[in-house]
Amino acid sequence: MKQEVIMAGFGGQGVMSMGMLLAYAGMMEGKEVSWMPSYGPEMRGGTANCTVIVSDKRIASPITPSPDTSIVMNLPSLDKFSSMIKPGGVLIINSSLIEKDTNRTDIEVIKVPCNEIANELGNSRVANMVALGAYLQKTGILPLESIVKAMKKVFAGKEHLIPLNETALQRGAAVVK
């Protein structure tokens, strides 16, 4: 199994963290992984995206001209990355910030109100985990528990953040079920 995903949004939306957690979790599960970040001219508030590849086999290149999935957290990211997705692929849209529809009819579009769910949970900063939960549920590339295990390593010293992030993952997954 191989899954190529581009995650994109404004700097500060946790796009890089989402990608790093996915890559780290994949590595902990014995998968081959690649994580390639790309930043716009500004960090916070500018555009940011990362490409993550999780595979059972060696990865030839971290660059993917046509990912299986794209997770877009804002409108500029939708405009930039929706056309790149492979036919039959998946587009996950943060419908809290994006009202526009894609004109693609050859992909599955999943709208997830990431910011609304995060706000219901009491912290807008977990919108990225809502999106990641939806992605994991749809693709099945890794179980949610793998991300939680990765959080325990990544959030060392900040373990109090794990329960909220785990709940956000679960809520995102529930949107797709």
Image (spheres, rainbow, N blue to C red):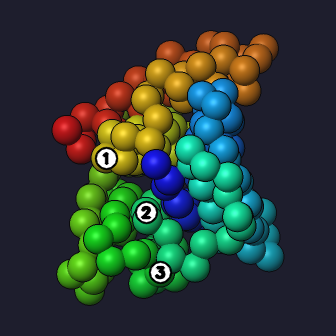
Decide: few, some or many residues near mark 2? Use Cα within 10 Å; few <14, some 14-19, many ≥20: many
Q: Amino acid at mark 1?
A: Lys
Residue at (40, 75) in percent of width and height: 86
Question: Looking at the rendering, in which quadrant would you find the C terminus?
Answer: top left
Residue 41 in view (yes/no)? yes
- Whether 19 is drawn above or below 6: the answer is above
Q: CA distance from mark 1 to mark 3?
A: 19 Å
Residue 16 in view (yes/no)? no
The answer to whether marks 2 and 1 mark residues whose Cβ atoms lie closer than 8 Å is yes
Residue 90 image label: none
Q: CA distance from mark 2 to mark 1?
A: 10 Å
Q: Which residue is under mark 3?
A: 84
Q: Is 137 left, or right, of 85 in this rendering?
A: left
Q: Amino acid at mark 2?
A: Thr
Q: Which residue is under mark 2?
A: 69
Q: Secondary structure at mark 2?
A: strand
Q: CA distance from mark 2 to mark 3?
A: 9 Å
Q: Secondary structure at mark 3?
A: helix
The image quarter in which residue 60 lies: bottom right
Horizontal and vertical percent position of residue 125: 55, 40
Residue at (60, 28) in percent of width and height: 29
Q: Is 60 left, or right, of 173 in this rendering?
A: right
In front of the other: 75 or 170: 170
Closer to the chain start, of discs 2 and 3, is 2
- Whether 118 is drawn above or below 62: the answer is above
Horizontal and vertical percent position of residue 156: 76, 17
